[in-house]
Structures are given as structure tokens and as C-alpha cells.
């Protein structure tokens, strides 16, 4: 009976980890959406491990985003695109096709999503972007955080006149 209870406890822990990681990623996407109240660098930084990496992979994304390492550097980079910066007039993120695996013993997880991003730019023009996100997570002091965020652009296309 003890082994059955232990197995159930492990399964519940994995399910809770899935939920926590989904909430973490939803919070990140929410902070990156525009319009939104100005995002504080500290709010973004709290989502990442101290040695986090954020990078664009693939020719298009590498050239556009490069690679940032360290919680503060990652948060400052992401925040540089968000209000009060005048980069986006509209920016929405949608996630689909989730593949999420949790190693509860190692306090680590990996996930893959397809992201659709609809963006209108302050200087004019709008586009639809699709990217594959591959993200590694670590549990630090009981909280899941982003350890390695990779984005690889799969598709992008200009959109007609933006409407708000």
C-alpha cells in the first residue's frame, strides 16, 4: 500500500508541476503582450533562474535576437521591446501544441510549444509570426523558473492594415 501511495504522490507532484509551469509561461507571455501596463524588469527577472539563457535559434531568430545570459540581462533584453519603449502598438502571444515533460526527481522540465504572435509596430505595419519555443525549466527554492528559452522562427507574414 505504501508504494501505491508513493506512486500517487509522485503523479500528483508531476501534475502540479505541469500546472505551475503552464502558469509561469502564461505569466511570461502576459508580461510580453501589448497593450499592457509598463512591464517592470524585476517582474520579468523573477521568472528566470539566475543563470538563465534566452536565445534566438535558426538563422532568422539568431540574427534578430542573439543570445542573452543571466537573469538581469535576459529581463532587460525582453523589457527593451515593451512599454514604455515605443516598439509595439499591439503584441499578442498565443501558444499551442504543448509537449511538456517533468522530471520531478531532478526538479527540471522541458517543454515545446508553437507560438503565434500578432504584432503591430509603433512605426507602422503588422505581421503574424509563428515560432517553435523550446524551454527548459528548473525548480529553484520551490518555484519553477525558466532556465533556457529558445525561440526559432518558423513563419512570418505581413498583415493588412492594423485595427485597434
Image (cartoon, rainbow, N blue to C red):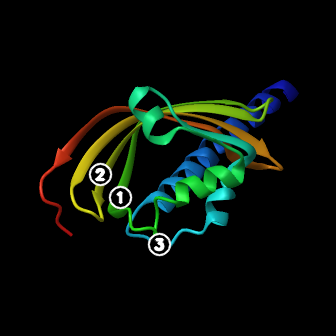
Q: Quadrant of residue 115?
A: top left
Residue 132 visible in the snapshot: no
- Nearest the viewer among 34 and 106 is 34
Q: Quadrant of the C terminus?
A: bottom left
Count residues near mark 2 (Cα–Cα under 10 Å), then give few for <14, some for 14-19, many for 20+: many
Q: Residue at x 87, y 29 (%)?
A: 2
Q: Quadrant of residue 100?
A: top right
Q: Quadrant of the N terminus?
A: top right
Numbered-mark total:
3
Element carrying mark 2 = strand
Element carrying mark 1 = strand
Q: Residue at x 61, y 45 (%)?
A: 21
Q: Residue at x 73, y 46 (%)?
A: 49
Count residues near mark 3 (Cα–Cα under 10 Å), then give few for <14, some for 14-19, many for 20+: some
- Spatial distance from mark 2 to mark 3, Cα to Cα? 19 Å
- Nearest the viewer among 127 and 106 is 127
Q: Nearer the viewer, mark 2 or mark 3?
A: 3
Q: Residue at x 23, y 54 (%)?
A: 126
The mark found on residue 118 in the picture is 2
Q: Which is nearer the N-term, disc 2 or disc 3?
A: 3
| Residues tagged 2 and 1 counted as in contact (Cβ below 8 A) | yes
| Residues tagged 1 and 3 counted as in contact (Cβ below 8 A) | no
- Spatial distance from mark 2 to mark 1, Cα to Cα? 6 Å
Q: Nearer the viewer, mark 1 or mark 3?
A: 3
Count residues near mark 1 (Cα–Cα under 10 Å), then give few for <14, some for 14-19, many for 20+: many
- Where residue 62 appears, x then y in whole percent? 47, 33
Q: Which is nearer the N-term, disc 1 or disc 3?
A: 3
Residue holding disc 1: 91
The mark found on residue 84 in the picture is 3
Amino acid at each position: 500500500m505504501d508504494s501505491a501511495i508513493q506512486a500517487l504522490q509522485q503523479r500528483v507532484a508531476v501534475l502540479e508541476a505541469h500546472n505551475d509551469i503552464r502558469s509561469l509561461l502564461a505569466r511570461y507571455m502576459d508580461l510580453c503582450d501589448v497593450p499592457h501596463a509598463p512591464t517592470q524588469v524585476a517582474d520579468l527577472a523573477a521568472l528566470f533562474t539566475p543563470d538563465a539563457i534566452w536565445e534566438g535559434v535558426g538563422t532568422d531568430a539568431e540574427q534578430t535576437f542573439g543570445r542573452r545570459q543571466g537573469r538581469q540581462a535576459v529581463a532587460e533584453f525582453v523589457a527593451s521591446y515593451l512599454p514604455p519603449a515605443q516598439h509595439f502598438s499591439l503584441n499578442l502571444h498565443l501558444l499551442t501544441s504543448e509537449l511538456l515533460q517533468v522530471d520531478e526527481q531532478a526538479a527540471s522540465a522541458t517543454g515545446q510549444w508553437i507560438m503565434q504572435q500578432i504584432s503591430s509596430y509603433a512605426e507602422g505595419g503588422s505581421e503574424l509570426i509563428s515560432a517553435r519555443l523550446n524551454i527548459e525549466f528548473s525548480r529553484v527554492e520551490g518555484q519553477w523558473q525558466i532556465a533556457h528559452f529558445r525561440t526559432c522562427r518558423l513563419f512570418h507574414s505581413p498583415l493588412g492594415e492594423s485595427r485597434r
